[in-house]
Amino acid sequence: MKNALIITGKFLIAAAIIAFMVTQGQIDFTLLQQIWDYKLVWFFSALCIITQPILATARWKKILEIKTKDTLSFYDVGKIAWVGLAYDSVLPGAVSGDILKVFYAQRLNPKLNKTFLLSSVLVDRIFGLLGLILVAGVSSMLFYTDIIDFAPKIKPLLEFNFLLLFAVVVFLASIFLHRRLQDLIHQVIQKIPYIGNFLSNLLEQVWLIGKNKLQVLYCLGLSISSHLVFIFGLHLIATPFYTVDVPTQYMFTFFPIGFISMAIPITPAGLGVGHTVFGLLFNLVGVSNGASLFNLFILTALPLYMLGFLVSLFGMKSLSDKQVYPSSLE
């Protein structure tokens, strides 16, 4: 009953935000009709967008294999990841896709216990966030002067990107610290009330990957690549409808902040929140219809993610039939 109320509340919040923006003339639904005049553009955009979760699957697979020391089936890991993506996209914070990923992943290998799998999902999200911040920070540095000349109002955002980039660099440096220093950090973090032990365990899982620099670079490379191709796909679908021509490379400076904002599970699929955030971000570079463009993103990405529901209904039988390995009950 509680979950049903939460879900209903999220949809009501999304509907209220969208209704308000429509009455203010900030959302133009006619773009959804016009997109069919650009079928080829839509196709290549969808191709880019669907590549993102495939690369993210490869990243999670690598994290799991660090524990198993065995090669896992990309097909099986991919099915699990896609089911999780579908549920996370539609019901964030209520019926968590992460729980489903852990439920099915226990059947992949006897070395995958529930504790590690929960940590692996969080570590995977951390690498995704690190990649997103690196894209925003590095692109802000590379194009800082040009984009300031193009859109002076975006300067505070670029400076915020620099701050996040610095934090990421410090975090990545901690991965390669001497074990004694890491133990000292553990002791300090464990003293934090309520969440100290959780944060300490999470750091331990990240540092476990850090023992192999190539694995860290591999996961970061996949994260950066997945975000680059995803942002380009969204930019591609929106290009015919920009009210001002914006160079492609500038998109990498402010799209990541939009994704980070949408990660907070306030509404399903970021509806309402995404409209507001991208409306504000696009306005920084002079594009006045950012909220309407978000509809195009939803129309393109969400149906692809929703395919995960079909996978959960018809493609998970082989994993469902496998018993949970004894070690995963630890």
Image (cartoon, grey):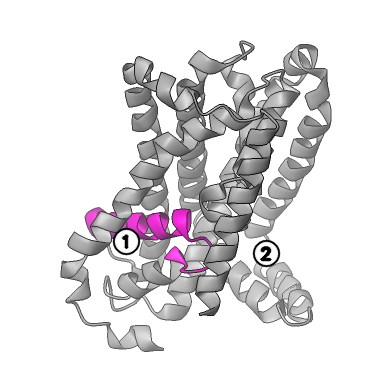
In the image, what residue occupies the spot 72% across and 41% down?
Answer: 165
Q: In which quarter of the image is residue 22?
A: top right
Badge 2: how crowded within 10 Å, few (<14), some, or many (20+)?
A: few
Task: Tell us which disc is closer to us: 1 or 2.
Answer: 1
Q: Mark 2 points at which residue?
A: 178
- Residue at the front extreme, as displayed: 23
Q: Which residue is drawn at 74% across and 13% down?
A: 146
For residue 300, above or below residue 116: above
> Which residues are the magenta region?
74-97
Disc 2, SS: loop
Dot 1 alpha-carbon crowd within 10 angstroms: few under 14, some 14 to 19, many 20 or more = many
Q: Mark 1 points at which residue?
A: 80
Q: What residue type is labelled 1?
A: Ile
Task: Name the amino acid, label 2.
Answer: His
Please state which of residues 198 and 314 is positioned toward the viewer in this rendering: 314
Residue 75 pos. (x, y %): 23, 54
Q: Specify whether residue 78 is painted magenta.
A: yes
Q: Residue 296 or 180: which is nearer the viewer?
A: 296
Q: Are marks 1 and 2 in contact (CB under 8 Å)?
A: no
Residue that appears at 60% across and 51% down: 14
